[in-house]
Image (tube, rainbow, N blue to C red):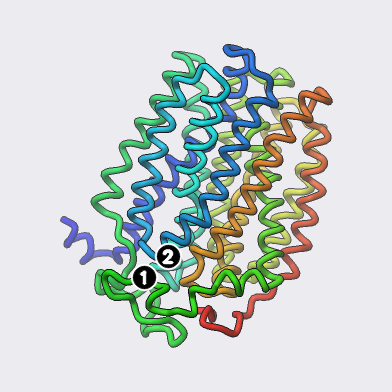
Amino acid sequence: MMGALRGRIYYGWIVVAVVFLALLVSAGVRAAPTVLVNPLETELGWSRAAISLAVSVGLLLYGFSGPVAGWLMDRLGPKILTLLGLGIIVGSTLAGATVRELWQLNLFWGVLSGVGTGIVAPVLGATVANRWFVERRGLVLGILGAAASAGQLISVPALMWLVVEVGWRQGVIFLALATLAVLPLVLVFMRDDPARMGLRPYGENEPAATESPAPEPGTTLADANPERRGVMAQALRAPEFWLLSGSFFICGASSNGIIGVHFVPHSIDHGIPEVTAAGVLALMGAMNFVGTIASGLLTDRYDPRKLLAIYYSLRGLSLLLLPFVTDFAGLAVFAVFFGLDYIATVPPTVALVADRFGRLNVGTVFGWVFCAHQLGAASASYLGGVARDSLGDYTAAFLIAGILAILAALMASLVRRDAIATGTARA
């Protein structure tokens, strides 16, 4: 059967489909805390700041796992890392259904869930897209970026419905079982790179002059090209790395941190029923699915710096208006508008990393850029909860996030695209 599939379509598309499913379930687990804030507050009496702190720990480790996972993927291949990450997600989610104490929440939903979902995260999609594709790379990045939207689209309303019908603990168990179902697909169908299957990246007719031959079995990419061992030393000296990391820090703060964690509680604060609020977030996920794939297509055609400037500017404007939108109709309009660029920033950011630091170094460099994204997300997640407890609403948090997003638009416009003059040259 596998041979027949290879004969009909390029095998990289099968890898993309499997990675899409892995990213989908990982994103579903990562989005779960927004549904659990109110049930945990009600059942166990914890403050919103305390719950937000546990979520922030998860977001922080989600980010710090990215550079390590990217570095290991560049050396060991993404398959083994994907299996490891999914295994950790399953275990931590099952354990997370049993929490009774705050330390358990911090351990299972914070530390372990953060590490697992940080391995099966955008750095995985970036690594796979740049290993398997030269042409259609932006489209693939858009498709894999949309997996996060699809995970939110499916898991948030489904989990909220289960919370209402059978309780949050049983709902979390269903989430773990869905993740477990993806493991055998990764084991059977995922492959590390095209060279080991006798293929070339999609759209590459001849080996690129700037890239090294595929490493022999038992060797790593760093062994095959020693210049790549110093890629992060070179990246840290490049202003573009800091511009991309800084703008992505703001991206994380203004999306996963403040909206991903606090949008549903904000809606409930204004009298929106729980399932309805989760449905609005799912609408945001649906629009993000469309927006991220469209962003991938646009990244193949237009300057990614201009795209990022547009995305961040629109995001900033929407966040500045959000405190004044409190009814269902207004929140739905916000969900459509904000959702179109929620994760649309990923394809152009990855494209700029690949252009500047080299296609085969994306796992390592983008891992650290993505770490900055999650530092922003963790900060906004916790401080958003503190603002709500201290001031009684999210107005200040939303306004600050909006101003920062406009700053990110300026930072993105200053990035240079030309490759650095070393072994990391543009592929």
Question: Helix, strand, or loop for circle 2?
Answer: helix
Residue drawn at x 45%, y 56% as measured from the top left: 124
Residue 107 shows in this picture: yes
Q: Amino acid at mark 2?
A: Asp
Q: Are marks 1 and 2 in contact (CB under 8 Å)?
A: yes
Is residue 195 positioned above or below 50 on the image? below
Residue drawn at x 49%, y 80% as measured from the top left: 227
Residue drawn at x 44%, y 73% as measured from the top left: 134
Please state which of residues 226 and 268 is positioned toward the viewer in this rendering: 226
Q: Earlier in the sequence, mark 1 or mark 2?
A: 2
Is residue 374 positioned above or below 123 on the image? above
Whole-percent x, y for residue 97 in the image: 45, 22
Residue placed furthest toward the bottom = 209
Question: Helix, strand, or loop for circle 1?
Answer: loop
Q: Amino acid at mark 1?
A: Thr
The residue wearing badge 1 is 220
Whole-percent x, y for residue 246 in the image: 71, 58
Disc 1 or disc 2, which is closer to the eye?
1
**Is residue 316 found left or right of 93 in the rendered image?**
right
Mark 1: few/some/many CA within 10 Å (<14, 14-19, 20+): some
The residue wearing badge 2 is 74
**Is residue 23 found left or right of 365 in the rendered image?**
left
**Is residue 1 found left or right of 251 in the rendered image?**
left
